[in-house]
Amino acid sequence: MHPRPTGAELAILQVLWEHGPATVREVHERLREDKGTGYTTVLKTLQIMADKGLVRRDETRRAHVYQAKIRRERTQSQIVREVMDRVFAGSASRLVLHALSTKRASAEEIAEIRRTLDEMEGQAE
């Protein structure tokens, strides 16, 4: 299992997951729009992430290209499990209820939640 990414690492992974492989400059430009992150910070963070095994670095071109080495879904599951265990005493229902009470879900999200619950209920029978 890979180490849990830090907040800064997650921001970079979000860029790579959404836009695919990218150079440091491309990642920096996307992050700068939202967070004002400096170029050297992005470079150093990507180097650390490569050492940790979170990203893969392609050094065949002049500008190195970085690609997420870990899957978004696996990372999300790992973080949710940790939060559920540490904050909600392992209770999935308390986690979900708190999440839904904290931020209003759209009609589409509620429909997706209902479908997932119906599928899970059908599997339990």
Image (cartoon, rainbow, N blue to C red):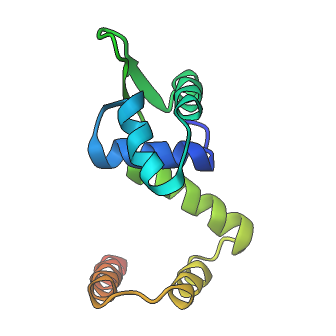
Query: Looking at this view, is 101 or 97 the one in front?
Result: 101
In this picture, residue 73 sits left or right of residue 47: left
Please name the residue shown 57% across and 21% down the image: 51
Q: Position of residue 86 (x, y in %)?
A: 73, 65
Q: Position of residue 116 (x, y in %)?
A: 32, 78
Dividing the picture into quadrants, the one containing residue 61 is top left
Query: Looking at this view, is 51 or 93 the one in front?
Result: 51
Please name the residue shown 69% across and 75% down the image: 88
Q: Is residue 57 above or below residue 42?
A: above
Query: Looking at this view, is 47 or 4 the one in front?
Result: 47
Residue 13 visible somewhere in the drawing: yes
Q: Is residue 88 above or below residue 68?
A: below
Q: Is residue 75 above or below residue 125?
A: above
In this picture, residue 102 sits left or right of residue 55: right
Q: On the rendered image, what quadrant is the N terminus found in? A: top right
Q: On the rendered image, what quadrant is the C terminus found in? A: bottom left
In this picture, residue 104 sits left or right of residue 80: left
* Count of marks placed on residues: 0
Dividing the picture into quadrants, the one containing residue 20 is top left
Q: Position of residue 37 (x, y in %)?
A: 55, 44
Q: Is residue 77 above or below residue 28?
A: below
Q: Position of residue 112 (x, y in %)?
A: 28, 81
Please name the residue shown 36% across and 11% down the image: 59
Residue 68 visible somewhere in the drawing: no
